[in-house]
């Protein structure tokens, strides 16, 4: 174990052996546990003309029916304008949970006139960045939800090269989102055609200065060496299928033809397995990092620049003024700044006070509810005791009456017995008198 001490400003680094176990070697485990507990979120966008196999591929990627194609009524199967729809699914694998948001763009490239059909998509991506930027400015930032689009799978139709719309879309969005180009339905191309098509696509991407997502090969370890030549494999030529074929007792995902089978997960047949490994297994976090550190950062800087450029314009206009007037203006600006800072601070304070008040109000309500509940229980108990008391009194009264009535009966029977006795004795006396 090595101890490294740094003493600013004369930076002297000394490597020292520790005499025992301190515990910071456990830091990666702490991070791991925390991340697993919190779960992960990822937003994947799919763009391409309808019928290119987007839904089939997404379902094949996540091995489940995630992507429903029937989100809109039958009559609207091919919408005239591009819609941006999103749906969220929660997936769990080996105790790790993933909140996967799929953003679909039905109608893209399906109209006769596709001018600016990328606009709603661009607006959606910007709106998500804006949402995130606003959330970051709140007092409580611990609950900021990341709904930014982390990756866009752009489906290219198999053919000879890119269409003008493909180029326009990628040009418009390459600085907003990580674009991963994909050739759909690659089984409709022969291996030679596929190689040639891929080369044409990459040539056009380069000649149009389009920046697609760069897989960071240098960071890969031994286990992931198979992905080293990834960039050379772009665009991924994929085959999708939701059907499991039974080939000699082996279950395979693929498409069966009279001349053979196109296996989805066979790297000799298509690039599906490369796409899945790199998108999900090895580069999901990098896609999120690039989104946060580069693409979102660009957006944030542009937003801030738009605000500050207004101030800069004011400054340039002022360079020709006389010094006194300039001083007055700057003083005014300074006062304005102070005022806005004060207002900002007051706003924050106000928000905090509001938060506190809301919490206190909630606590007060909670206490009141508890108090009311306790009173209700007390009242109920009091009523029960009263009822019991009344019942006891009634019982006592009934008992007394019973005792009273049984006492009269005894008295009656005693007196009748006495009169009988008297009668007998008088009869006895009479008969004795008769005898004498
Ligand atoms: P989407 O409109 O882009 O979502 O396309 P779908 O996934 O709904 O697929 C449209 C049709 O193409 C369906 O009949 C699929 O079975 C078929 N399909 C999907 N993927 C492939 C593929 O890789 N190759 C071939 N030949 N057909 C496919």
Image (cartoon, grey):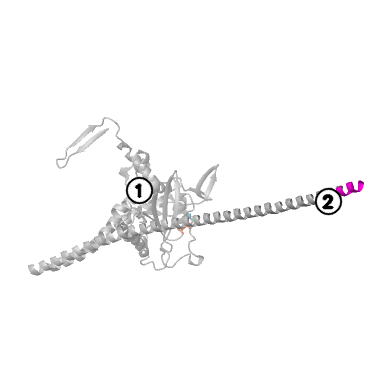
> The magenta stretch spans which residues?
429-436
Q: Quadrant of the N terminus?
A: top left
Residue furthest to the left in view is 323
As helix, strand or loop, the secondary structure at mark 1 comes to: helix
Residue furthest to the top in view is 19
Pick the front one: 12 or 294:
12
Please tell me which residue is depicted at 35% across the width and 38% down the height of the picture: 222
Please tell me which residue is depicted at 50% across the width and 67% down the height of the picture: 75
Is residue 435 a member of the stretch shown in magenta?
yes
On the picture, is 379 further left or further right than 102? right
Return the x and y of residue 379 as percentages of the image width and height: 50, 57
- Give the mark count: 2
As helix, strand or loop, the secondary structure at mark 2 comes to: helix
Please tell me which residue is depicted at 71% across the width and 53% down the height of the picture: 408
Residue 110 appearing in the image = yes
Q: Which residue is mark 1?
A: 285
């Amino acid at each position: 174990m090595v101890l490294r001490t740094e003493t600013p400003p004369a930076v002297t680094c000394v490597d020292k052996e520790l005499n025992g176990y301190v515990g910071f070697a456990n830091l990666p485990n702490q991070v791991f546990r925390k991340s697993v507990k919190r779960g992960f979120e990822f937003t994947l966008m799919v763009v391409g003309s309808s019928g290119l196999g987007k839904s089939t591929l997404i379902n094949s990627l996540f091995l489940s029916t995630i992507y429903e194609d029937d989100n809109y009524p039958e009559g609207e199967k091919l919408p005239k304008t591009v819609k941006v729809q999103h749906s969220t699914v929660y997936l769990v694998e080996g105790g790790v949970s993933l909140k996967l948001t799929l953003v679909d763009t039905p109608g893209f490239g399906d109209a006769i006139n596709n001018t600016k059909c990328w606009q709603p998509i661009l607006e959606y991506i910007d709106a998500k960045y804006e949402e995130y930027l606003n959330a970051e400015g709140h007092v409580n930032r611990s609950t900021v939800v990341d709904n930014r689009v982390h990756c866009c799978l752009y489906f290219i139709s198999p053919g000879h090269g890119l269409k003008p719309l493909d180029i326009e879309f990628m040009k418009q969005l390459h600085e907003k989102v990580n674009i991963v180009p994909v050739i759909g339905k690659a089984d409709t191309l022969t291996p030679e055609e596929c190689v040639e098509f891929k080369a044409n696509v990459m040539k056009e991407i380069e000649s149009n200065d389009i920046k697609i997502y760069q897989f960071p090969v240098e960071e890969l370890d031994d286990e992931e060496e198979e992905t080293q030549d990834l960039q050379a494999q772009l665009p991924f030529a994929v085959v999708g299928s939701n059907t499991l074929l039974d080939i000699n007792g082996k279950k395979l995902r693929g498409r069966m033809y009279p001349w053979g089978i196109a296996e989805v997960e066979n790297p000799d047949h298509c690039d599906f397995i490369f796409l899945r490994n790199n998108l999900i297994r090895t580069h999901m976090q990098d896609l999120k990092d690039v989104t946060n550190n580069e693409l979102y950062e660009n957006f944030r800087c542009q937003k801030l620049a738009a605000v500050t450029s207004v101030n800069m314009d004011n400054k340039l206009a002022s360079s020709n003024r006389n010094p006194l007037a300039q001083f007055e203006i700057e003083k005014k600006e300074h006062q304005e700044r102070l005022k806005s800072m004060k207002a900002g601070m007051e706003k924050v304070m106000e928000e905090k006070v509001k938060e506190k008040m809301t919490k206190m109000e909630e606590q007060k309500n909670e206490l009141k509810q508890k108090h009311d509940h306790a009173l209700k229980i007390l009242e109920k108990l009091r009523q029960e005791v009263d009822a019991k008391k009344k019942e006891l009194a009634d019982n006592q009264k009934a008992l007394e009456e019973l005792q009273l009535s049984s006492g009269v009966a005894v008295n009656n029977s005693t007196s009748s017995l006495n009169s009988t006795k008297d009668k007998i004795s008088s009869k006895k006396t009479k008969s004795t008198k008769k005898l004498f």
